[in-house]
Amino acid sequence: MSQTGSFEEWFEEMATLARKDPDLFEEKRRELIEQAIEGAAPENRLRLKQLQWRIDRERERAKTPLAAAIRLHDMLMEMVYGEGGFLEAVETLRDLLKDIQQGKAPRPQPLKKGGPEAKVIPFPRRV
């Protein structure tokens, strides 16, 4: 498997491998993911490993490759557009920069709660 050449050539090699030898493709896929994680800044590696773990679990839970793609798409959309997601972080930074440029003290941002709230349901007592 060549690592030189165009992305299109590499992609075609991987697609052919996936069709002809799915087990070898899976091995190569895992190796590439591990290389990417190990090539990241040390302070980002744990978070990347956690994200990859979550991706792998979503893929395992899906019954078909299409279902896996939909699950991963939904996960990505939540990470970008959901509460506390990327878009919200960018908007917060934009607002802080705007305040600084206007010579205002930055507005304190409200603290986010740690995830969705849970309701405790008591179990009936045994008599």
Image (cartoon, rainbow, N blue to C red):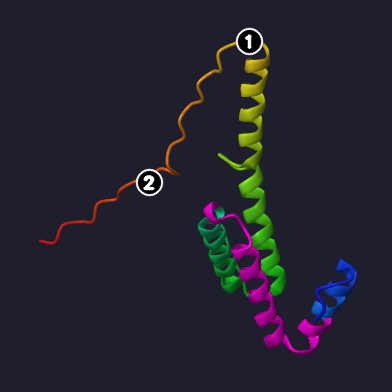
As helix, strand or loop, the secondary structure at mark 1 comes to: loop
Rendered location of residue 68, percent (x, y): 66, 68
Query: The C terminus is located in which quarter?
Result: bottom left
Q: Amino acid at mark 1?
A: Gly
Locate residue 8: give its quadrant. Answer: bottom right
Q: Amino acid at mark 2?
A: Ala
Query: The N terminus is located in which quarter?
Result: bottom right
Q: Nearer the viewer, mark 2 or mark 1?
A: 1
How would you rate the neighbour count of disc 2 (Cα within 10 Å): few for under 14, some for 14-19, many for 20 or more? Answer: few
Residue 99 part of the magenta segment = no
Work out how far the residue at label 2 is from the one at label 1, CA to CA, in angstroms: 41 Å
Rendered location of residue 86, percent (x, y): 63, 41
Rendered location of residue 73, percent (x, y): 69, 57
Locate residue 4: give its quadrant. Answer: bottom right
Majority secondary structure of magenta residues: helix
As helix, strand or loop, the secondary structure at mark 2 comes to: loop
Most extreme residue toward the left is 127
Locate residue 117: give its quadrant. Answer: top left
Q: Which of 65 and 32 lies nearest the eye of the viewer?
A: 32
Nearer-N-terminus badge (2/1): 1
Q: Which mark is residue 118?
A: 2
Q: Which of 45 and 77 lies nearest the eye of the viewer?
A: 45
Rendered location of residue 101, percent (x, y): 68, 15
The residue stretch that appears in magenta: 16-43
**Residue for point 55% across, 68% down:** 57
Residue 25 part of the magenta segment = yes
- Quick check: 46 above or below 120? below
Query: Horizontal placement of 49 versus 74: left or right?
Result: left
Q: Which residue is mark 1?
A: 103
**Residue for point 63% across, 75% down:** 63
- Quick check: 24 above or below 47? below
